Amino acid sequence: MPDKTPSVAIIGCGFGGLGAAIELERNGIDNYTVFDRGSGVGGVWRDNTYPGAACDVPSPTYSYSYELETEWSARFGSQSEIKAYLERCAEKYGVLQKARFDTEIVAARFDESSGRWELEIEGGETQWFDALICATGQLSRPKIPDLDGLAAFAGDHFHSARWDHSVDLTGKKVAVVGSGASAVQLVPAIVDQVSELHVIQRSPNWVGNKWNHRSNRQVKWLMRNVPGLSRLQHNVEWAWYEARVPIIFDQFDPLRGGLHEWLKYKIRREIKDPELRKAVTPDYKVGCNRVLLSNEWYPALDRDQTTLHANAVTRVTPAGLVLDDGTEVDADVIIWCTGFTATEYLAPIDITGRDGRKLHTEWKNGPEAYLGITVSGYPNLFMIYGPNTGSLTNTIIFLLEKQARYAREAIQRIAKDGGWIDVRQDVQDAFNEEIQRKLSGTVFTSGCPGWYHTEDGKVVAVWPGSHVAYARATGKVDFDAYEIGTVSANA
């Protein structure tokens, strides 16, 4: 069969989907369409506009390796800067002309006779593609608890990822439910604006220092004009973060213990109230969920107008919240920092593979994939940021690039030979057995709170190793691991 340019659908236009599109574009595969249910480029960096929103990974590494940015205002870029960076990348590489925004994919069905995917768009339109790349992300679907009384709340309430900028918080009593990454950023940003701030913390997080030095015109000029300087900065930051990998392994408990003591010292240094210190100190090992970064979180909690409640919310009343110890919290505004449906990969898209199998039915006990990229029974489907590819020790952008390259190489094979490729079930099973074996020797299976595992404790979100190891595992597509399917010439 002669070479042909396959048609590719990409779902999602955040860092992962945009990176996949650029990978195809840079390698001569220009017959693709990017679909995104949002209004533009950016993914989470488009949606999360809450006060204080910023990156917690140094921006020199939180960039595509082939498109390093020299204009960051500080070591950790703000939400608006990151969104603008992604928009510039989309424009530079010609992705915008091939993107359909405000377009939600509701279903995808593989047709074995033609070896193609049929995508159904909300409203009933359908389109056919030779390959499908799903880059919907883990943090794209906000989760608000289904609590009794929520509809009767008399004030305003919204999720941090759907910030309502029409609501003025000045002088109001505000309840922030949650104490994770978003809360750690937005609480210090609003504490001086409100009259009362109630932080509802079900489980505390470890919080480290954020060494966020500012840039200036001279530094930016040097980055722009000195050959290799921005690359050196990127590589040094990347290597520094990669060096943290040992803290996830049980065999390095003494090393993790040192970090544990340092973070407890930070709490003692920044909080005067001994009871508050106790409430914000986690009872689980450092590293089993993301170590958050902030220099303002603990001081904001120790302010006179702030009250920390180490409890869960049981119901909502017209006047506020009721906690599990019976405490009633009056609030004019409730801000839900309650996370996302992070373990429900590719939801709510209805995905049908070979022989009518349903992906979400097969994943009812937790998602599994080969290298986090391909799933047996779903040919020519590739995931960006799939199961067990989350990063806690270094930049996720590195992993996204490796996944995009892997998908591109597979699609080039499809272009050359036609037909479809489908990872063998035995290969996928062996890979996931090995992943779970490795995870059993890490901090992630030590009883962590958070979203890295399913309700029954299976860890499905994180990669149990270094970024170098993932790059090695995905460096070349092993087509012996795949079943190769052919289609008739007139299909």
Image: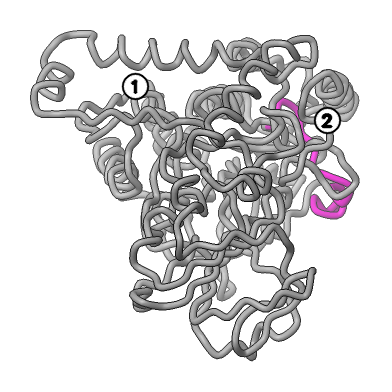
Q: Is residue 452 in sight in this rendering?
A: yes
Horizontal side, residue 75 vs residue 302: left or right:
left
The tag on residue 245 is none
Which residue is disc 1 drawn over? Answer: 66
The amino acid type, in three-letter code, at marker 2 is: Thr
User: Does residue 322 lie above or below 105 as drawn?
Assistant: below
Residue 400 position, x and y percent, is 53, 30
> Mark 1 and mark 2: span between their CA atoms?
35 Å
Horizontal side, residue 305 vs residue 137: left or right:
left
Residue 166 position, x and y percent, is 34, 78
Residue numbers of the magenta segment: 356-372
Which residue is disc 2 drawn over? Answer: 445
What residue is shown at x 28% (from left), y 44% (from top)? 81
Q: Secondary structure at mark 1?
A: loop
What residue is shown at x 70% (from left), y 42% (from top)? 115
Q: Quadrant of residue 385?
A: top right
**Is 360 one of the magenta-colored residues?**
yes
The amino acid type, in three-letter code, at marker 1 is: Tyr
Q: Judge by depth and name the residue closer to the eye, 398 or 168.
A: 168
Q: Judge by depth and name the residue closer to the eye, 233 or 320.
A: 320
